[in-house]
Image (cartoon, rainbow, N blue to C red):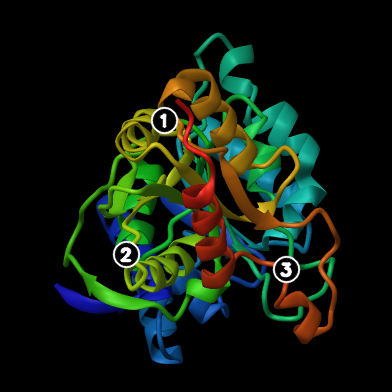
Amino acid sequence: MTVTSYLGAIGAAQREAMEADPRVIIFGEDVEANVYGTMGGKSRADKGDFLQMFGPNRIRNTPISEEVMVGAAAGAAMTGLRPIVDLSYSTFLYMAMDQFVNQVAKSRYMFGGQASLPVVFRSAMFYGLSTAAHHSDRPYPMFMNVPGLKIMVPSTPTDAKGLLRTAVDMDDPVMSFEACLLWGMKEDVQDGEFRIPFGVARTVREGKDCTIVAISTGVPAAMQAAQKLEAEGISVEIIDPRTLVPFDSQAVLNSVGRTGRLVIADPANKTCGAAAEISAIVAEEAFDCLKAPIMRVTTPDTHVPFSPAIEKQLYPNAEKIADAVRKAMAAKTRS
């Protein structure tokens, strides 16, 4: 085990994947100079070692065109390579929507299974840093509505590394949404190669009074809320889905079956978001287990302002999550 940062874990996963399989390549906008985003290193020496190890044929800068990056990745994947594409800001994904929706997501189906798309698209969600409306979106819910795409939202260095290694091995396109607010998080991470399966949620904390399903930065906020609530005699269970497609609905249903209450902490927008889908699953399949209405703690349906003071108020935090749990606990128990 080695103490590793979130970005360092991503870099390690990419390095190990490239060492293990010569078909794995990395490309994107200015990736050769992007030490922290793509290489996951801590210095220019790390970047130099990485480039020297794999060479310019496997680490390529591209034109500043997301449509080119995504289209080239789809073609490379269908002809035998396994690209990892660094698309930088997650809002840049919109530039390539036709490629994502009509080519990447549909090609395997349209070719009757004769083509596979083993490609990973990485993007960073830069919310919470005053990057304003054009750079602060959390767009994973919109891609959840596109059949053919797998979606990972790691919340820890361990998950970032293990899920990424799994993603590179897959024959389907994977979209990785990485919150920049987690980049500096450090923990003991297993050395060497390991994989975390998609569609298997992680129980972050066990509890008996209320379930919190937390996504991305909602996980550390939920942990802080749990500590506050524990002092009040309220025991919460925290579930981190880790992947949204496929989604481990059974883990959530089992937890709600034990606690009878559900709060969902999701930093994306409320309408048609991941929290809405999770709410629907529980309402359809575990309604009789619920002792209180389902609570969603999300970002309101508004553009992200530039002002740090205003933006800070938008996202789920420990106090908002704790308040939602308190409301769920105070609700009249269904007979």
Q: Amino acid at mark 3?
A: Leu
Q: Quadrant of the N terminus?
A: bottom left
Q: Residue at x 34, y 42 (%)?
A: 201
Label 1: state its secondary structure: helix
Estimate how packed mark 1 is, as few (under 14), some (14 to 19) or many (20 or more) residues with alpha carbons within 10 Å. Answer: some
Where does label 1 land, which residue? 249
Q: Earlier in the sequence, mark 2 or mark 1?
A: 2
The picture quadrant where one finds residue 66 is bottom right
Where does label 2 land, which residue? 233
Q: Return the x and y of residue 38 as percentages of the image width and height.
A: 50, 69
Identify whether 40 is placed above or below 238. below
Left/right of residue 96 with respect to residue 70 in the rendered view = right
Cα separation between marks 3 and 2 = 28 Å
Foreground tag (2 vs 1): 2
Q: Return the x and y of residue 192 as percentages of the image width and height.
A: 17, 63
Label 2: state its secondary structure: loop
Q: Is residue 152 visible?
A: no
Where does label 3 land, which residue? 314
Q: Residue at x 27, y 75 (%)?
A: 187
Foreground tag (3 vs 2): 2
Identify whether 111 is placed above or below 201. above
Left/right of residue 49 with respect to residue 300 in the rendered view = left
**Residue placed most toward the observer, 32 or 252:** 252
Q: Quadrant of the C terminus?
A: top left
